[in-house]
């Protein structure tokens, strides 16, 4: 296992390209409006097409890993996302751009499941939540920040097409690093990583696993509330606190960058202090409290709430996504991508329902009531995790099973 930190470093940097090529379309909006004469609703569709591809491919990506192995799956995911970025960069019309963004999202989804599976292959017995925190928290946030902020300067200098092309080059470089530098997994786990595992037993182990459904449900509201805050908290600040556009954008930045903190400490807390499931529940509860307090705060207080929501929303996710890999006695290593895919698909329901619920409650009652409902639901759903048969945490912490 001496190469596990080298493996994690390569997975970490591969994660940067995953979110970089997810978010670097945002700085291109100005160029897309000028070149393709897109309106705001069409830009929303451009954003949504990545999410659509990302959402539908979680479970199929896990199936690919079962058939061809995790090593193939991560390479295929990077290649597909890079292809999608290339299509986007050379799009001559909105329809082609939408195809490119959909393909990009599919590749990102396939990549994510295999990256989580390979991390489990190296860290299943030691610091698994910590390793997942570094990739799904810190690296995810760093890649998003690069795509949103660094690529803004590249777009301004070189144009949106060349900026997207540069993202594709980063993807190609990641592909090469995974082929030529990524270390060979431990001998004892090569068979689990090699593919040819697909069969009805895989689907029985996954779709009849009550813990996966309960885990998905436990984060459904918190996951959706986090993305509701990312999308709508700046708008709320402008419309109800009469904040400036600069102050509203600052909230978005705080929400994103506070994920560094949540990703960095979340896994360590789970591995060393509290255990996996208690850490998830505790983080969701703290996120819920911050969400409930939103209507009571001025702009300065809202910045603090944004930091808490961003940090603890990320913290809960990075520990949550580590749980399938930690269930050594119930989830074979080869099943980790498809198990994670099932959980992500369930949680994605919250990503659709919670923003819609916020809008309905805000329209029928008030935005203050909407934030309260989101917080209460985040708090309530998190306790579904108490029904989960808890895995044995790393670092020797054995938790009692429910």
Image (spheres, rainbow, N blue to C red):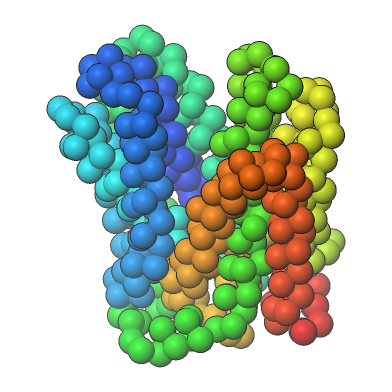
Judge by depth and name the residue closer to the eye, 397 or 49.
49
Q: Is residue 334 visible?
A: yes
Q: Is residue 233 above or below residue 285?
A: above
Q: Is residue 4 visible?
A: no
Examine the image and state in which quarter residue 111 appears: bottom left
Q: Residue at x 61, y 21 (%)?
A: 249
Judge by depth and name the residue closer to the eye, 225 or 205.
225
With 70 as the anchor, is 320 left or right in this view? right
x and y, in percent, of residue 375 in the image: 75, 51
Q: Residue at x 50, y 53 (%)?
A: 352
Direction front: furthest residue = 364
Q: Is residue 115 above or below residue 232?
A: below
x and y, in percent, of residue 109 in the image: 40, 55
Q: Residue at x 70, y 51 (%)?
A: 374
Quarter the N terminus occupies? bottom right
Q: Residue at x 77, y 84 (%)?
A: 402
x and y, in percent, of residue 186 in the image: 49, 70
Q: Is residue 367 above or below residue 263?
A: above
Examine the image and state in which quarter residue 276 appears: bottom right
x and y, in percent, of residue 49 in the image: 34, 44
Examine the image and state in which quarter residue 169 appears: top left
Direction top: furthest residue = 157
With 342 as the anchor, is 220 left or right in this view? right
What count of labels does the image hold? 0
Direction left: furthest residue = 92
């Amino acid at each position: 296992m001496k190469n596990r930190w080298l493996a994690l470093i390569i997975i970490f940097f591969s994660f940067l390209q995953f979110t970089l090529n997810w978010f670097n379309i945002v700085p291109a909006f100005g160029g897309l409006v000028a070149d393709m004469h897109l309106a705001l609703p069409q830009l929303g569709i451009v954003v949504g097409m990545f999410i659509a591809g990302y959402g539908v491919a979680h479970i199929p990506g896990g199936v690919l890993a079962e058939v061809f192995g995790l090593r193939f799956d991560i390479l295929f995911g990077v290649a597909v996302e890079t292809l999608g970025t290339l299509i986007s960069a050379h799009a001559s019309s909105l329809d082609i751009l939408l195809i490119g963004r959909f393909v990009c999202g599919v590749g990102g989804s396939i990549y994510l499941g295999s990256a989580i599976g390979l991390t489990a292959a190296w860290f299943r017995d030691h610091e698994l939540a910590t390793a997942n925190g570094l990739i799904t928290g810190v690296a995810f946030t760093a890649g998003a920040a690069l795509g949103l902020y660094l690529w803004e300067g590249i777009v301004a200098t070189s144009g949106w097409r060349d900026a997207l092309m540069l993202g594709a080059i980063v993807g190609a470089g990641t592909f090469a690093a995974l082929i030529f530098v990524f270390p060979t997994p431990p001998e004892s786990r090569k068979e689990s990583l090699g593919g040819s595992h697909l069969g009805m037993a895989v689907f029985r182990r996954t779709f009849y696993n009550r813990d996966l459904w309960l885990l998905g449900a436990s984060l459904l509201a918190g996951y959706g509330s986090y993305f509701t805050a990312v999308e709508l908290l700046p708008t709320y600040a402008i419309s109800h606190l009469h904040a400036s556009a600069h102050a509203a954008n600052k909230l978005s930045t705080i929400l994103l960058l506070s994920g560094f903190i949540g990703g960095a400490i979340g896994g360590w807390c789970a591995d060393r202090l509290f255990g996996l499931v208690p850490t998830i529940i505790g983080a969701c509860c703290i996120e819920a409290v911050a969400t409930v307090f939103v209507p009571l705060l001025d702009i300065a207080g809202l910045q603090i709430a944004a930091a808490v929501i961003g940090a603890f929303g990320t913290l809960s996710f990075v520990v949550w996504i580590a749980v399938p890999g930690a269930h050594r006695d119930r989830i074979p290593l080869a099943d980790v991508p498809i198990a994670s895919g099932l959980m992500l698909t369930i949680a994605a329901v919250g990503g659709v329902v919670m923003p819609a619920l916020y809008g309905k409650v805000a329209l029928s009652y008030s935005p203050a009531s909407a934030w309260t409902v989101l917080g209460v639901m985040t708090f309530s759903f998190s306790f579904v995790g108490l029904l989960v048969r808890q895995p044995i945490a790393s670092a020797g912490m054995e938790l009692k099973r429910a």
